[in-house]
């Protein structure tokens, strides 16, 4: 029973930190305007998903939610990731995602 209560505490803590961060970022955006300073990506929806992923990975002992959020962000931004990887083939990264997915599925069914 204590593990379940601890899991809820982790979740509440992660959500609280995420909401506080969003409040700070929205307030800062209203005051200084990230876009006017060349930082429009700070307030983009997909970046907020990345913030949530990092916060859930950091604050929750069960990393599954953070990993799912990070995976969704990664899939949404596959073009950015591939371009950042530079000379690597555009097929290498999707193949790696496929292999990781198969491996995780196999590990979860054991």
Image (cartoon, grey):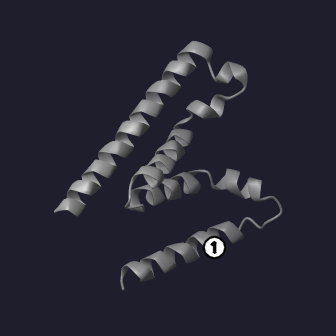
Locate residue 69 relative to residue 34 in the image: left or right: left
Locate residue 101 relative to residue 63 in the image: left or right: right
Figure quadrant of the C terminus:
bottom left
Figure quadrant of the N terminus:
bottom left
Question: Label 1 crowding class (10 Å Cα cut-off): few <14, some 14-19, many 20+?
Answer: few
Locate residue 39 relative to residue 58 in the image: left or right: right
Residue at image point 56% right, 13% down: 31
Q: Position of residue 14 (x, y in %)?
A: 38, 45
For label 1, the SS is helix
Q: Position of residue 38 (x, y in %)?
A: 72, 26
Residue at image point 40% right, 62% down: 64
Locate residue 54 relative to residue 110 in the image: left or right: right
Q: How many marks?
A: 1
Q: Quadrant of residue 66?
A: bottom left
Q: Position of residue 58 (x, y in %)?
A: 47, 52
Residue sitting farthest toward the left: 1
Residue sitting farthest toward the bottom: 110
Residue at image point 28% right, 49% down: 9
Q: Is residue 99 above or below residue 110?
A: above
Q: Nearer the viewer, residue 7 or 44?
A: 7
Q: Quadrant of residue 44?
A: top right
Q: For mark 1, what is the residue?
A: 95
Q: Is residue 6 above or below residue 98?
A: above
Q: Is residue 12 above or below residue 4?
A: above
Residue sitting farthest toward the top: 31
Q: Position of residue 104 (x, y in %)?
A: 46, 75
Residue sitting farthest toward the right: 87
């Amino acid at each position: 029973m204590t593990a379940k209560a601890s899991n809820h505490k982790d979740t509440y803590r992660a959500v609280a930190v995420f909401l506080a961060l969003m409040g700070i970022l929205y307030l800062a955006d209203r005051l200084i305007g990230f876009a006017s300073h060349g930082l429009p990506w700070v307030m983009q929806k997909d970046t907020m998903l990345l913030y949530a992923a990092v916060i859930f990975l950091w604050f929750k002992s069960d990393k599954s939610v953070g990993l799912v959020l990070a995976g969704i962000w990664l899939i949404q931004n596959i073009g950015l990731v591939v371009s950042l990887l530079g000379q690597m083939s555009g097929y290498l990264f999707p193949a790696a995602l496929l292999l990781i997915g198969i491996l995780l599925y196999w590990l979860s069914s054991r």
